[in-house]
Image: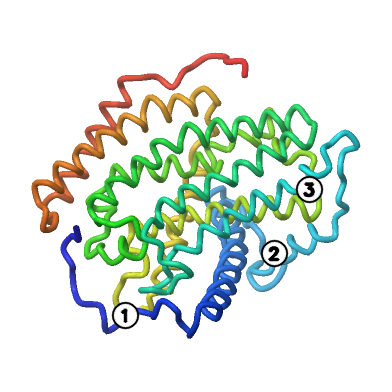
């Protein structure tokens, strides 16, 4: 089912052929290069945006020496990491220790194979694209657990096990929050989901967006859920025994995950590449940057949660709300099979506000001293 189609924006973009620019291998090569360049450039941009934004929020300057306005600071950081010595503990599992950063980074890049930068502008338009994203993205936690296990360090292992616990717990509400979008779009293809958004789905699915955003941040260990590398408890957590290029790969994977989450949110909730006047790819990039800025904002605002609070939030709060959201969305889709009316936007926002307030009073995240 496609919601209200909105204005005809075909004048601003044209659908690319599935084999553009001609032939399978050329298509694969061109979009592989585009994806790698997109990830590397946006990750460097994210590092700069986060450091500058947090500096302003904390009333300080941030990077402003290397390059104009400090724009080359991410490049300087990368060069510094490349020149550092690679140290491996004597008692570590050498093979597992070596492979962990690669296993953590590879799935992050693979996610972008189904993310559309324009109408048809993607590596592969899978008819189960959103399931592919969920399945592939979860593999990154295997690399983190490999790092914790292979380092033969109790702090690293504890941080890695926290990551596995978070992924197992938050994967459930995250997947359930997507079902409302799938019911409205009538497709699992990310490109079809974007095409179905005459009205951005965030307006019809505010509760689903909230659940997806919180669960996604918890899965990729963004603050306030960064318990696997809590410096006050675990030194550096899972990557304590990593330095040089291997640490750089983990650093790239962390911001790559933030980029992937921002891209998926922009695609399924904010209309992806849709928008007037500007080129489709530029609309997509702008929406991705806006979502990431919200992540930075929450990191600067909220203190780090405790591990028992992290688990309680997933199972006692997000999971029930995700199930309720599916029920509400299913009723609305059955009631208006030809497209949801504008009036439901205000109804769904009110329902979200009421549910969040009432449900938050039904349970406590836990207080007092807890030994973990």
Mark 3 residue element? helix
* Place of residue 46 in the rendered image (x, y in percent of width and height, measured from the top left): 57, 60
* Place of residue 316 in the rendered image (x, y in percent of width and height, measured from the top left): 38, 24
The foreground one among 8 and 195 is 195
The foreground one among 351 and 162 is 162
Pick out the residue farthest to the front: 24
Mark 2 residue element? helix
Q: Which quarter of the image is occupied by the C terminus?
A: top right
Pick out the residue farthest to the left: 335
Report the disc number at residue 285.
Answer: none
Return the residue at label 2. Answer: 73
Return the residue at label 3. Answer: 98
Q: Residues within 10 Å of mark 1 (few under 14, many from 20)?
A: few
The residue lying at 45 percent from left, 53 percent from top is 132
Q: Residues within 10 Å of mark 2 (few under 14, many from 20)?
A: many
Q: CA distance from mark 3 to mark 2?
A: 27 Å
Mark 1 residue element? loop
* Label 2–label 1 contact, CB within 8 A: no
The residue lying at 46 percent from left, 56 percent from top is 262
Return the residue at label 1. Answer: 277
* Residue 317 against residue 302 in the figure, above or below: above
* Residue 335 against residue 266 in the figure, above or below: above
The foreground one among 203 and 256 is 256
Q: Which quarter of the image is occupied by the N terminus?
A: bottom left
* Place of residue 307 in the rendered image (x, y in percent of width and height, measured from the top left): 55, 26
N-terminal of the two: label 2 or label 1?
2
Which label sits in the foreground, 3 or 1? 3
| Residue 163 lies in quadrant | top right
């Amino acid at each position: 089912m496609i919601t209200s189609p909105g204005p005809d924006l075909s004048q601003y973009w044209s659908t690319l052929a599935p084999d553009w620019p001609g032939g399978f291998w050329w298509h694969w090569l061109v979009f592989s290069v585009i994806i790698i360049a997109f990830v590397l450039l946006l990750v460097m941009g994210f590092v700069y945006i986060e450091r500058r934004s947090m500096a302003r929020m904390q009333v300080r300057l941030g990077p402003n020496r290397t390059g104009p306005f400090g724009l080359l600071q991410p490049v300087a950081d990368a060069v510094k990491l490349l020149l550092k010595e690679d140290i491996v503990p004597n008692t570590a599992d050498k093979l597992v220790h070596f492979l962990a950063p690669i296993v953590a980074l590879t799935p992050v890049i693979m996610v972008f194979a189904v993310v559309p930068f324009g109408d048809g502008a993607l590596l592969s338009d899978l008819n189960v694209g959103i399931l592919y994203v969920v399945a592939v993205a979860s593999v990154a936690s295997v690399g983190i657990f490999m790092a914790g296990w292979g380092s033969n360090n109790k702090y690293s292992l504890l941080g890695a096990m926290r990551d596995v616990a978070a992924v197992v717990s938050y994967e459930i509400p995250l997947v359930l929050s997507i079902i409302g979008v799938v019911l409205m779009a009538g497709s699992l293809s990310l490109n079809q989901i974007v095409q179905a958004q005459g009205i951005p789905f965030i307006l019809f699915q505010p509760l689903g967006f909230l659940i997806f955003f919180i669960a996604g941040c918890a899965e990729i260990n963004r603050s306030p859920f960064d318990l696997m590398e809590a410096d006050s408890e675990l030194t550096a957590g899972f990557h304590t025994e990593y330095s040089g290029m291997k640490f750089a790969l983990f650093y790239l994977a962390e911001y790559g995950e933030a980029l992937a989450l921002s891209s998926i949110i922009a695609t399924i909730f904010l209309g992806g590449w849709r928008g007037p006047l500007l080129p489709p790819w530029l609309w997509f990039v702008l929406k991705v940057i806006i979502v990431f800025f919200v992540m930075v904002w929450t990191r600067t605002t909220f203190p780090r949660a405790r591990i028992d609070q992290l688990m309680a939030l997933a199972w006692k709060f997000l999971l029930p709300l995700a199930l309720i959201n599916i029920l509400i969305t299913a009723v609305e889709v059955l009631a208006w099979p030809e497209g949801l009316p504008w009036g439901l936007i205000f109804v769904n926002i009110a329902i979200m506000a009421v549910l969040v307030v009432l449900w938050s009073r039904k349970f406590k995240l836990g207080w007092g001293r807890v030994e973990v």
